[in-house]
Image (cartoon, helix red, strand yellow):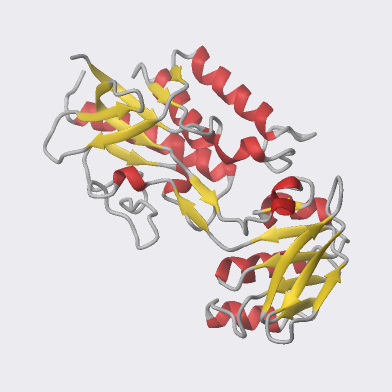
């Protein structure tokens, strides 16, 4: 069976950036797009903060441009997902299987499977996605500058997003299910010291209101049973992300929530020849530009690994 130089699992900014660099290094990469070709950005209507697009670009259009660029340098893009892997220390190649059962071998593997935002599961939330409903304040907060918004969540992410939005918006409603925040003490202090953040304790979101875009939310106090409407124009869900790394369990080191662990300053995992990039290994920044940056790093790390091991 042929041993490929490089297989990239997952698309999105990290996968396509890795493909561009690996292809230019004559590694003839094969990229498997996964179940969501283009990753999370394909659910974003407008990308306004990626350098090089002064007037902005839609997420799907940006991913199509990255894919075309990767293919121009010789990347083979396969519209399939990898369902099983076999990574072993000491081996000169690693095994992966597609969903259809095809087995492939490669000297290097770059993981770019990303992470998926968690949502409340409301039908109105899904209906108004990208029309006021968002899982990223840094990505979309600018569009609601000067407007009243809401954030749901009680951890560090929710506290961080609420304080970020408070710099742009006259009022931020923080919707917390419990009677306390789970966020770290320093993040709680920032929330409580920000006068335009109003915390709604013991509160659940019943519905996101609006026809074509968010016009408010209806919330219910779990203690009193009282329901009320808040006139917000954006609803930011900050209840966490789940890295798409389940198939790597038992092979790669990861933290308690499933984010892949890499050697600091590199994309190297605990298995030689296997590299992790993008949101699958990043629970801090989670931006398209940082994902693309680590995709570049992964390709360079993979190429250097091939040279050091005198492969190919």
Determine whether, in the image, residue 187 is placed left or right of residue 255: right
Determine whether, in the image, residue 83 is placed left or right of residue 285: left
Q: Residue at x 32, y 43 (%)?
A: 247
Q: Quadrant of the C terminus?
A: top left
Q: Is residue 7 above or below residue 216?
A: above
x then y, percent, for residue 59 = 67, 34
Q: Is residue 1 above or below residue 181?
A: above
Q: Which residue is more in the foreground, 221 or 242?
A: 221
Determine whether, in the image, residue 7 is placed left or right of residue 12: left
Q: How many marks?
A: 0
- Identify the residue at the far front of this view: 225
Q: Residue at x 62, y 38 (%)?
A: 41
Q: Is residue 78 above or below residue 52?
A: above
Dividing the picture into quadrants, the one containing residue 227 is bottom right
x then y, percent, for residue 208 = 78, 58
Dividing the picture into quadrants, the one containing residue 298 is top left
x then y, percent, for residue 87 = 21, 38
Dividing the picture into quadrants, the one containing residue 257 is bottom left
Determine whether, in the image, residue 4 is placed left or right of residue 242: left
x then y, percent, for residue 304 = 28, 31
- Identify the residue at the far left of this view: 90
Q: Residue at x 43, y 46 (%)?
A: 244
- On the question of residue 268 being in view, the answer is no
- On the question of residue 202 being in view, the answer is yes
Q: Quadrant of the N terminus?
A: top left
Q: Residue at x 46, y 19 (%)?
A: 77
């Amino acid at each position: 069976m042929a041993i490929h130089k490089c297989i990239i699992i997952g698309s999105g900014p990290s996968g396509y950036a890795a493909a561009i660099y690996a292809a230019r290094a004559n590694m003839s990469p094969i990229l498997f797009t996964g179940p969501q070709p283009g990753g999370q950005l394909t659910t974003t209507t407008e990308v306004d903060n990626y350098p090089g697009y002064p007037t902005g670009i839609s997420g799907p259009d940006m991913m199509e441009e990255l894919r075309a660029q990767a293919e121009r340098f010789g990347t083979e893009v396969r519209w399939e997902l990898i369902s099983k892997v076999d990574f072993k220390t000491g081996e000169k190649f690693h095994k992966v299987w597609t969903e259809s059962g095809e087995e492939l071998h490669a000297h290097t593997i770059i993981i770019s499977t990303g992470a998926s935002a968690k949502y409340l599961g409301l039908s109105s939330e899904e209906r108004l996605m990208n029309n006021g409903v968002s899982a990223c304040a840094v990505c979309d907060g600018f569009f609601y500058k000067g407007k009243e918004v809401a954030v749901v969540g009680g951890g560090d992410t929710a506290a961080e997003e609420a304080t970020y939005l408070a710099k742009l918006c006259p009022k931020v409603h923080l919707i917390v299910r419990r009677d306390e925040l789970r966020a770290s003490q320093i993040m709680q202090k920032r929330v409580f010291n920000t006068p335009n953040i109003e915390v709604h304790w013991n509160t659940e979101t019943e519905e996101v209101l609006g026809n074509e875009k968010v016009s408010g939310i209806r919330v219910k106090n779990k203690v009193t049973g009282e329901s009320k409407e808040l006139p917000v124009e954006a609803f930011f869900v900050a209840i966490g992300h789940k890295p798409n790394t389940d198939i790597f369990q038992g092979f790669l080191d990861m933290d308690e929530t499933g984010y892949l662990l890499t050697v600091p300053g590199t994309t190297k995992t605990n298995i030689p020849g296997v590299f992790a990039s993008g949101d699958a290994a990043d629970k801090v920044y989670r931006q398209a530009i940082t994902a693309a940056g680590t995709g570049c790093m992964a390709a360079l790390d993979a190429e250097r690994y091939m040279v050091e091991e005198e492969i190919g």
